[in-house]
Image (tube, helix red, strand yellow):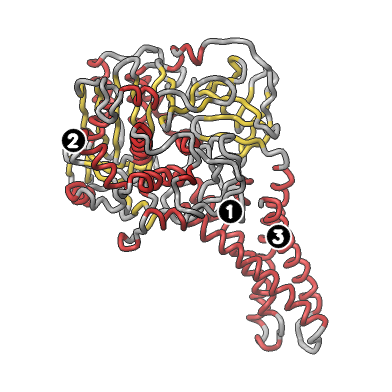
Amino acid sequence: MKQYKRILAVMSSVLTLLPFMPVSAASAEQTESAAMTSDDFENVIAEYAQETRFASFQTAVFTADDVIYTGRFGYSDIEQGIRADEQSVYDWGSISKTLVWVSIMQLSEQGKLDLNDDIRTYLPDGFLTRLKYDDPITVLNLMNHQCGWEETSAMIETADNNKILPLDEALKQSEPNQVFRPGEITGYSNWGAALAGYLVECVSGESFSDYVHTSIFDVLGMEHTSIAPDHSDTPWVQERYETMKAYQSIYADSLTPIDKKSFIQIYPAGAAVGTIDDLAAYGRAFLSDPCPLFEKQETLELMLSPTSFFGDSGLVQNCHGFWTSYYGVTCLGHNGATITGSANFVFSREKGTGCVILANQAGESSFTELIPVLLFGDSKENPELTESGSKKGVDISGKYMLSRDVWKGIPALYSKLSSVTIEKMDDGTFRLNDMIELNETRENLFVINFVREGSPVGYAKNPDGRTILSLGSTDLVKAPNLRLEQIMIYGYMILAVLSFILLIVSWIQTIVKRWNSYGGWQFIILSRAAGIVSLAGIVIYYIFLLSYSGVFTLCKTLTKYAEMMCIGCYGVSLLASLFFLFVKRKQNAKPAAHILNIAISGLLLAFSAALQLWIA
């Protein structure tokens, strides 16, 4: 048991550094490589639950015929001492997306849509307004998260259920820019999955919520699951969810309650809530023959067949929306995370077994990561990862950006600062951010040798020659000119700090002398204040970046508009100083103050404008 505690202690501390990597097995400290027996599994989970600090989690292990294990641990309300039970409901998070993909496959089976069609065939005319390329965007591109959209910085959640928008309006207000050519880059997209949900509405003629209830929940007897943003589609769930508390662990061994009043506007991407028993019933459908979700078993087989790969390695990455996880056996599934919970869904048709885990704790990784490892074994036993072959010896060193990030506009400035560095070591291996080792095992395939040992990294070059590294659901895209951009960004930050210092000096001067004796100082102070706002935006952004929360996208949006206002302030201040210096010369402000302000405001304005042109 102690070895599992060591594994999870290290794993929990670094998972936030690896959000783009696929789920795989535990570290090299683990000596038991094979999956556990059912008795061992139950004992280890129960023992670990006694020794670990958490809010509550529930797990179920199932086959096609039955649920063979269900465990319920912890409290749905710690303060009131209310234990989690069979009526406790949890967020599915992004497991909700699999409901979208099942719906798509059902409609395809019925001949109502074609996976290779351009999605604009089914959408209202002019629905997509921020496309960069004229290339078709296929339904399959949506399922593979390869439509080319950047991460959206628009508000996709609301704290007021009276402000929940219809799905089409929510999508229009949060549409991201398309920055990559469709089919070339994998970039996990909540917006893209929600758009696929709207596609279901357009084709079926029903709301996505109604369609899912009729075609999935009712078919499987899932009476205790909701999908609507406010959970009003299932009143029983809505009532239970309001009494269920959520927690986060800010410090080690500490749990803090979270305000749960947040409603997902683009709800097909992650709004499902339900009991563990319902989720287990859903999972069992993918092991069943015949599968109750489809008219033909061939449709399920098609759905679970490969549609995208890790670079040019030939290693399967995605199967019609289900991500591949490499444990002792190769599995499929989807994990989920919201600001109020964590979830995981993993199954293997080869083994005929699956598991689901739900927790009312944001960022919970101990059980959502450990349980699949115990059930399916260590990735070191998976021949798809361990077999070696001919190697290209390619050099993957350089600066990279996550495809799932903001690539255009002012928020992209901060994405440049968050770039990933890969260095080549003397022994021929590579190191990501100076801590994660990557070893080439065969042509176009690297394997991470770190806590998540066995996580694959695929290598490829897109048609324009840019290096692409596939890490699970998100690619790393090589950025050749990143150094110059970073120099510009840091220069901008230095000037903002200088503005802050000069503002303090200005304030002291205005306190000592009368305000009206310093004509023009108001505009000089305006520029200094703008510099402070700009610098504060950078600091606040990184605070939210390092402690991810549901207001992160709101922070990005506010920062974007604040920076635009700062650019305007620099311009106004610069023009004012020119006016006072050359036109209205009869005033008591010293010319040197205006000259300095022109220089500082001009540099800030030039840096900011150059960055926007470069980033765009």
Residue 416 position (above or below residue 155): above
CA distance separating discs 1 and 2: 45 Å
| Foreground of the two, 63 or 367 | 63
Name the kind of residue labelled 1 in the image: Pro
Q: Which mark is first along the chain, 2 or 3?
A: 2
- Which residue is disc 2 drawn over? 221
- Which residue is disc 1 drawn over? 411
Residue 228 screen position, x and y as percent: 29, 49
What residue do we see at 67% from left, 27% from top? 396
Name the kind of residue labelled 3 in the image: Ala
- Which residue is disc 3 drawn over? 609
Q: Residue 519: name its quadrant.
A: bottom right
| Residue 204 seen in this snapshot | yes
What residue do we see at 50% from left, 30% from top? 472
Q: Nearer the viewer, mark 1 or mark 2?
A: 2
| Foreground of the two, 158 or 50 | 158
What residue do we see at 23% from left, 50% from top? 233
Q: Which mark is first along the chain, 3 or 1?
A: 1
Count numbered badges in the picture: 3
CA distance separating discs 3 and 2: 57 Å
Q: Is residue 374 left or right of residue 612?
A: left
Image quadrant where one finds the N terminus: top left
- In the displayed image of the protein, which residue is found farthest to the right? 582
Residue 304 screen position, x and y as percent: 39, 24
Residue 151 position (above or below residue 64): below
Q: Residue 374: name its quadrant.
A: top left
Name the kind of residue labelled 2 in the image: Gly
Q: Which mark is first along the chain, 2 or 1?
A: 2
| Foreground of the two, 515 or 404 | 404
Label 3 crowd (10 A; few <14 / some 14-19 / many >=20):
some
